[in-house]
């Protein structure tokens, strides 16, 4: 089996994407345990400013706009911590928001956002059931049918990711939704970067 190296030098192995789903990114997966769509525990890892409560209203607004853009059941704004090795779920709106917001964990086991961090490309799951990138117990417990995550990058620096779970009309997230969410991430990246820079210097 051919192996490749990820952006942070981790060995990666091919994975099996959902049947019938064309992925523009995330076609490889670092060797790791089965993934859940968000960290399963709260870890004491933070650069400090990502958790600043002044961020929450603005990030919730961005999550709401992402949710409306692709008609998602749940939308999340995740921030990169410790150079992208950890994920902090800073804001979330929708059905599963309460289960996600405020949690953090290692990117290597953080599911879709971790994969988006690692590849810095969108990761789309058309059919969650049976997809190796998601922990199937969480897929069943939360009723996840389709998911999408796109990285937020500004001036070559990883800032975070947008993640959406389930499409309100019951359809899988398609290439158009991926393109829309990716374009939105590119639009908001300078604003988030500027806000985080100001908090770092306060």
Image (tube, rainbow, N blue to C red):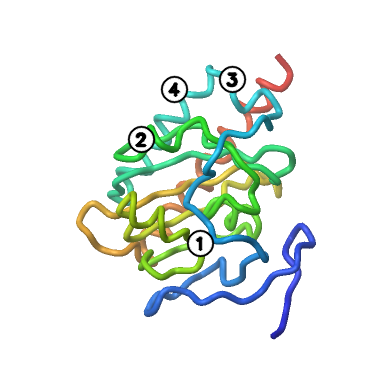
Query: Badge 1, how many Cα within 10 Å: few under 14, some, many 20+?
Result: many
User: Could you tell which of marks 4 and 2 lies nearer the N-terminus?
Assistant: 4
Of the pair 4 and 132, the residue shown nearer to us: 132
- What residue is shown with label 3? 52
C-alpha distance separating marks 3 and 1? 28 Å
Residue at image x 23%, y 51%?
168
- Using the image, determine if residue 169 lies above or below residue 93: below
Query: Residue 40 location in percent, x, y?
Result: 52, 43
- What residue is shown with label 2? 93
- What residue is shown with label 1? 123
* Mark 1: secondary structure: strand
User: Could you tell which of marks 4 and 1 lies nearer the N-terminus?
Assistant: 4
- Using the image, determine if residue 129 lies above or below residue 51: below
> Which quadrant holds residue 74?
top left
Kindly indicate whether the residue at mark 1 contacts the one at mark 4 (C-beta within 8 angstroms): no
Residue at image x 48%, y 54%?
149
User: Where is the N terminus found, in terms of image quarters?
Assistant: bottom right
- What residue is shown with label 4? 57
User: Could you tell which of marks 3 and 1 lies nearer the N-terminus?
Assistant: 3
- Residue at the limit of the structure toward the front, as seen here: 137
Query: Residue 47 location in percent, x, y?
Result: 71, 28
User: Could you tell which of marks 1 and 2 lies nearer the N-terminus?
Assistant: 2
Q: How many marks?
A: 4
Is 46 left, or right, of 134 in this rendering?
Answer: right
- Using the image, determine if residue 117 lies above or below residue 6: above
Residue at image x 63%, y 29%?
194
Residue at image x 67%, y 66%?
31
Query: Residue 183 location in percent, x, y?
Result: 47, 52
């Amino acid at each position: 089996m051919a192996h490749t190296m990820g952006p942070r030098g981790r060995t990666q192995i091919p994975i099996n994407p959902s049947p019938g789903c064309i992925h523009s990114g995330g076609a490889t997966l670092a060797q790791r345990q089965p993934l859940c769509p968000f960290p399963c525990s709260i870890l004491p890892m933070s650069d400090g400013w990502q958790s600043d409560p002044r961020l929450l209203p603005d990030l919730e607004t961005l999550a709401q706009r992402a949710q409306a853009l692709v008609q998602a059941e749940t939308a999340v704004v995740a921030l990169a911590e410790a150079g992208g090795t950890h994920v902090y779920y800073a804001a979330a709106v929708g059905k599963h928001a309460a289960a996600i917001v405020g949690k953090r964990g290692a990117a290597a086991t953080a599911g879709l956002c971790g994969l988006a961090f690692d590849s810095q490309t969108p990761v789309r799951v058309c059919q969650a059931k049976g997809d190796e990138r998601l922990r199937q117990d969480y897929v069943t417990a939360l009723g996840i049918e389709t998911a999408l995550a796109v990285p937020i990058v500004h001036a070559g620096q990883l800032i975070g990711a947008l993640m959406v779970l389930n499409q309100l009309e019951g359809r899988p997230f398609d290439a158009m939704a991926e393109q829309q969410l990716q374009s939105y991430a590119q639009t908001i990246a300078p604003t988030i970067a500027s806000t985080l820079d100001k908090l770092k210097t306060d």
